Image (cartoon, rainbow, N blue to C red):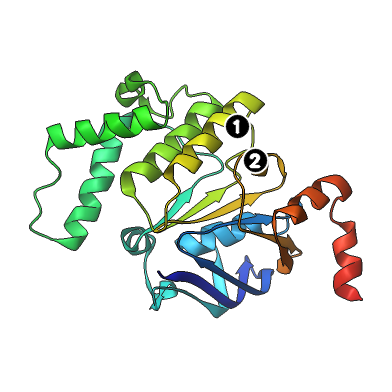
Amino acid sequence: MSSLIIENLHVSVENQLILHDLNLELPQGEVHAIMGPNGTGKSTLAFTLMGHPHFKVESGSIKFNNIDLLKLSPEERSRLGIFLAFQYPVAIPGVTVANFLRTAINAHRKAVNPDDKGIPIPEFRKQMLEKMRLLEIESEMAGRYLNEGFSGGEKKRLEILQMAMLEPKIAILDETDSGLDIDALRIVAKGINTLKNSDLGILVITHYQRILNYLTPDVVHVMVDGRILLSGGPELALRLEEEGYEWIHSITSA
């Protein structure tokens, strides 16, 4: 198995340094959670991992399977097996969920084999409906325009469906729990748990502990002011929920 390895990462936005000397290793087959207050750089890390041009890497490295991700475009990172579930998925009127998913799959296939003719429609439809059943998603969603008129829960479940169809090696879930009521959160977490396997490393980025009631991480990392200050087991998330983040500063400055 390979690991996503981040070493000494410094990232700026509009000449302001957001991430400072950040280090993290996420092996395939494990679930890691990053928790931290709002504005601490969690989403900056997510977008940097996918290569968003707004975020400038000043120094450090990001590697997966000994490949330097910083030399790859967002599309190349996706084809390598890096996946980002957005905190705020955008709507694309006129493009159905099914067409979007099939286009994404075909792009991956063509990157591997330029002569690939694309996934046959019957095969794609069978695969999509199987994944939708697995994730308890109504089949009629496949014919709807992407995220148009979707509830918050439907948008997040669609992100998990994309993850299921693309079968990434590393999945970054950027505040997937935001805006969800408890029932929607439980359904989304169940879908993530269904997809867990030894080939998939999952990085859950969250502000609150509540999603971790349903999705148990192997490791919890605490990010404050653009740095990971502390790492531990699931019990760390419970303490953060009870006591907040102030005590982290006293420990790390001692």
- Disc 1 from disc 2: Cα separation: 7 Å
- The residue closer to the viewer here, 71 or 195, is 195
Residue identifier under label 1: 185
Image label count: 2
Tell me what residue is drawn at x 45 percent, y 63 percent: 28
The local secondary structure at tag 1 comes to helix
Residue identifier under label 2: 211
Tell me what residue is drawn at x 88 percent, y 69 percent: 251
- Lateral position of residue 168 relative to residue 123, left or right: right
At label 1, the amino acid type is Leu
Cβ–Cβ below 8 Å for labels 1 and 2? yes
Is residue 53 shown to the viewer in this render? no
- Give percent across and percent down for residue 134: 38, 32
- The residue closer to the viewer here, 16 or 85, is 85
- Lateral position of residue 97 relative to residue 40, left or right: left
Is residue 86 shown to the viewer in this render? yes
Res 73 quadrant in image: bottom left
Q: Residues within 10 Å of mark 2 (few under 14, many from 20)?
A: many
Q: Is residue 179 above or below residue 248?
A: above
At label 2, the amino acid type is Ile
Q: Quadrant of the N terminus?
A: bottom left
Q: Earlier in the sequence, mark 1 or mark 2?
A: 1
Q: Is residue 223 above or below residue 128?
A: below
- The residue closer to the viewer here, 245 or 190, is 190
Tell me what residue is drawn at x 10 percent, y 54 percent: 116
The local secondary structure at tag 2 comes to helix
- The residue closer to the viewer here, 71 or 137, is 137
- Give percent across and percent down for residue 46: 55, 57
- Give percent across and percent down for residue 136: 42, 26
